[in-house]
Image (cartoon, coloured by chain):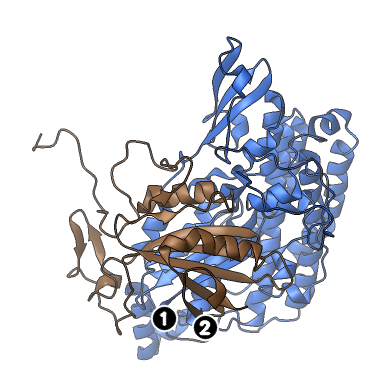
Amino acid sequence: VKWSDVPGFVEAKEAYDETTVVVERERLREACLHARDELGFNVLADIVAADYLGWGGKGVSGYVGTATGRDLNLPATQGLQALPQLKPRRFSVSHHLLALAHGAPRVRLQCWLDEGEPVPSVVSVWPAADWHEREQYDLMGIRFEGHPNLARLLLEDDWEGHPLRKDYPIGGEPVRFSDAE
Amino acid sequence: MTLAPSHPAGRTRRWPIVAPDIYEGSRIPERVPTVLDVPEELRDSDDLLRINFGPNHPSTHGVLRLILDLDGEQVVGLSAVVGYLHTGFEKNMEAKTWWKAITYPERIDYVGFQNNELVFVLAIEKLLGLEVPEKATWMRMLLCELNRIHSHLVFLGTSALELGAISMFWYCFRERETILDLSELVTGARMHTRYFQAGGLAEDIPAGFFPECRKFVALMPHALDDYLALLDRNQIWLERTKGIGLLSAQDAIALGQSGPVLRASGVDWDLRRDSPYLAYDQVDFRVPVYTGGDVYDRYRVRMDEMAESTRIVRQCLDRLERMEGRPWIADDRKVVLPPREELHTSMESLIHHFKIVTEGYRVPEGEVYVAIESPRGESGCYVVSDGGPRPWRVHFRAPSFAALEATATCVHETLVADLIAIVGSLDAVMGDTDR
């Protein structure tokens, strides 16, 4: 497959027997249309976003979460043996595509973005994207532009913050009627 | 707006789609694919009744809430609300070491627990590049197939129960009990076994498992005959399921359906055959495909799958019985706990044990997506590692999540009573949907 024909193509990587095609964020929908119609990837298996805030920082992977953030000095907390490769932006959004064809070919279309930048919605390409995009919006705060109904999916409508972000506090939750109130 | 992939007339249909069109065009709602809007002409009608179906209705298989607009008994509007069982598994797993996180996935899809555990363990192994001993591979396959039967039995029992066939529930749960007993015999736990370890199995297969499992394999075909005798010529069951909840092959693909729902819509697709993992390329089984796309065909696919799974279990037993005394876990001291007895005599082993238990093993940097055929369809696991002892990001592609997206498409001119059959036939586990 010639990945360089994908609209907005940036680079193609092979790792762990998987193909990752990085595309420009703005042209993601075109890239998906191309993958569906020209390359035969007719199923959208999954959409997933990852937050790389603090990626590669010392001790990051062994952090112990507390109400105020990470504590690098707790026991069993150790740094990385080698620094991982730096990421181009804070968030990655990966579309895992599958072709219902011999050998079950798969590809990961990936785009990178910073806080506040929207990603084009692919609901008009695969209706299945509806909930997947809502979930990533809900938990990771990725805005999908052109989604017909971009509301929270799993959390309550009035939930504050996006829990899967790395800067979302874990280990504590605000208590009503505490001393401060 | 065209939603479904276009298939120009005249082009010959090719594998994997084997079904003729069961309806013209696409039935996926136009505005939002998962929301059925009330038709324009009915919107101001006084007869319209908006009700909450769930979240605590017994036939929603957990806590699914459907907001229905009813015109008499007719469902004219539908919108699903999920998230009542959201427990933040993915976030929690980021704070656990890799090997402690293995306990989480089985609680996500608590009916197909063994398969969910497998997909996460396979993802870890893919990053680590671990070679798994043959015995562990076959035992994993055996347990996953038993788990598939277990899951389909729960589907069959509860779906029939909801349509009034109460006795089915007891029969199915009788066989389910046998499977759980087998599970207890092997792993010590009836559900959520945590028996799969990165590198193989947590412990060797206990003596006495094979004869007990043989008994089950001999019993299951008769049990399936019983179920068929009870349901398959039962006029009420047939009328409640045939032609209900139609989903065409094109719509199923566009909606990302997988597993039995996809195969009942006439798409010949099964990851066990088409993208083999474990040792599925070395066993003989058939992939049942039906072309009706209705509730009945989804039930038939699962019935046939139980028979096929029983065959796979038998083949696994044939292999495993000849593997006695062989290793059940990889010999990699950086990842796998050393044998218990060595801790008394070997300083090295004690250090390895201590390091794995406290700090956890380190998994090489990278991102992988592993997909397997769980009882509900494509169960995928996306993990990112930064090279440390904890996962950076874990995400599960839940087949139930995808299945529920098809609800609005399936309820085309249905009665509210049929909605129960439809939701049941999609076989969504809410823990899997909400994670």
Q: Does residue B148 appear in the picture of this structure?
A: yes
- Quadrant hosting residue B306: bottom right
Residue type for callout 2: Gly
Q: Amino acid at mark 1?
A: Pro
Q: Measured along the vertical axis of the image, is residue B190 above or below residue B230? A: below
- Give the residue drawn at x 55%, y 54%: B398
Q: Which residue is under mark 1?
A: B364
- Percent x, y of residue A48: 46, 59
Report in which chain the residue with disc 2 lies.
B
For chain A, the rendered hue is: brown
Q: Residue lying farthest top?
A: B46
Q: What residue lies at 68% left-to-right and 30% top-to-bottom? A: B419
Tell me the subunit letter for badge 1.
B
Residue A67 in the image, given as x and y percentages of width and height: 20, 53
Mark 1 and mark 2 in contact? Answer it, CB < 8 Å: yes
Which mark sits nearer the N-terminus, 1 or 2?
2
Q: Colour of chain B?
A: blue
Q: Is residue A109 left or right of residue B234?
A: left
Q: Nearer the viewer, residue B165 or A58?
A: A58
Q: From what the image shows, is residue A169 above or below residue B160?
A: below
The residue identified by callout 2 is B129
Q: Residue A25: horizontal and vertical position, in percent?
A: 41, 63
